[in-house]
Amino acid sequence: MSFPTRRLRRLRTSSKMRELVQETSLDPRDFICPVFVQEDLKSRVKVDSMAEIERLPLDDLNDEVGTISDLNIPAIMLFGIPAKKDEEGASSFDDKGIVQKAISQIRSNFGDKIVIMADVCLCQYTSTGHCGIVQNNKIDNDSSINTLAKIATSQARAGVDTVSPSAMMDGQVAAIRKALDDEGFTDVSIMSHSAKHRSSFYSPFRDAAECAPKFGDRKTYQVPFTNAREAMREVESDISEGVDIVMIKPALSYLDLIAETRRRFNIPVAAYSVSGEYALVKGAAKQGWVNEQEITSEILHSIKRAGADMIVTYFAKSAAKFLQES
Ligand code: PBG
């Protein structure tokens, strides 16, 4: 009988031993919690495709942010759903728009107790449902980045900490950085959805934020899911334009890109575990096919292990709770 010379099982003999050699850990401080706020809403509305996720009226926002902050989650990501849409998405850069109101309300109630991040995009605000301005049936890059810059400065005037462009327009980070600096908002940071892929994993979000494109798709601006080098060029471009945090999106099917970004660049890396990733887990858990808490923990640890410094996740609150209890 031959004996193995190496025994990796020695370090798995007890739970304390396993704790000692654990390489990756998860903490509520890793999370950014998405928050949907809708204009002219009387009470919370459930999102059908995303169990336990709701759109909130402004009046419920303080409660929600209080809950998030009490769970030691350091940041929120605000998405607004306006009452009116038009071709230009004008309500996106209105100083009295829904997100701007939400930002200033949270800022005056919570001060510096939570990092306020806000999505900078047009699709919730345009009648076309596209992330940029449509001209002659095309998504026009250069007029779109001007509008994105206007959204960012109006959010900055409301008191945002971090703007998070998700439109995938070329030059959006540079345009936003310049506009912010020109108005003196040199301390407002940018977390770009740097490599946001054209993904089927976003469908539940479109239900949550009412932002499905009315014609065509997002293939002319989002990165094809087949392309890794192109994703790295997106990250590289954002860094050269002055981004503060880069993001890979979605997360679970893109762990290779999270790892690659971590290896190549010395900048904080965020991962966005998107609505479809959430919905798949929720759906299977509801059927009793998987254990929700265990699978959530495994998924979030995997995203950290791949190299993410922070995770935007719809599991933020539930994961923070089970982490506190364990
Ligand atoms: C749109 C936007 C999308 C998401 C975040 N911002 C949807 C899209 O591009 O169609 C998806 C987020 C998610 O699925 O959780 N700017």
Image: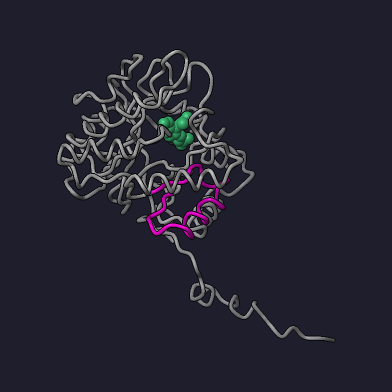
> Ligand 1 is in which quadrant of the figure?
top left
Q: Quadrant of residue 67?
A: top left
Q: In this view, does 141 lie above or below 61?
A: above
Closer to us: 174 or 254: 174
Left or right of residue 230: residue 288: right
Left or right of residue 6: residue 34: left
Closer to us: 282 or 275: 275
Q: Quadrant of residue 154?
A: top left
User: x%, y% of residue 33?
Assistant: 36, 44
Q: How many marks?
A: 0
Residue 181 visible in this rendered orientation of the protein = yes
User: x%, y% of residue 301?
Assistant: 50, 57
Left or right of residue 110: residue 238: right
Q: Which color scheme did the rendering employ for the protein?
A: one colour
Magenta region, residue range: 246-270
Classify the position of the N terminus by image quarter: bottom right
User: x%, y% of residue 80?
Assistant: 32, 28
Closer to us: 97 or 169: 169
Residue 51 visible in this rendered orientation of the protein = no
Instruction: Identify the residue at the far right of this view.
Output: 1
Question: Which residue is drawn at the image coordinates 54% and 73% (left, top)?
Answer: 18
User: x%, y% of residue 294?
Assistant: 55, 54
Question: Which residue is drawn at the image coordinates 53% and 56% (left, top)?
Answer: 302
Q: In this view, does 257 lie above or below 102?
A: below
* Residue 134 is one of the magenta-drawn residues: no
Question: Which residue is drawn at the image coordinates 27% and 40% (left, top)?
Answer: 177
Classify the position of the C terminus by image quarter: bottom left
Q: Is residue 187 above or below residue 148?
A: below
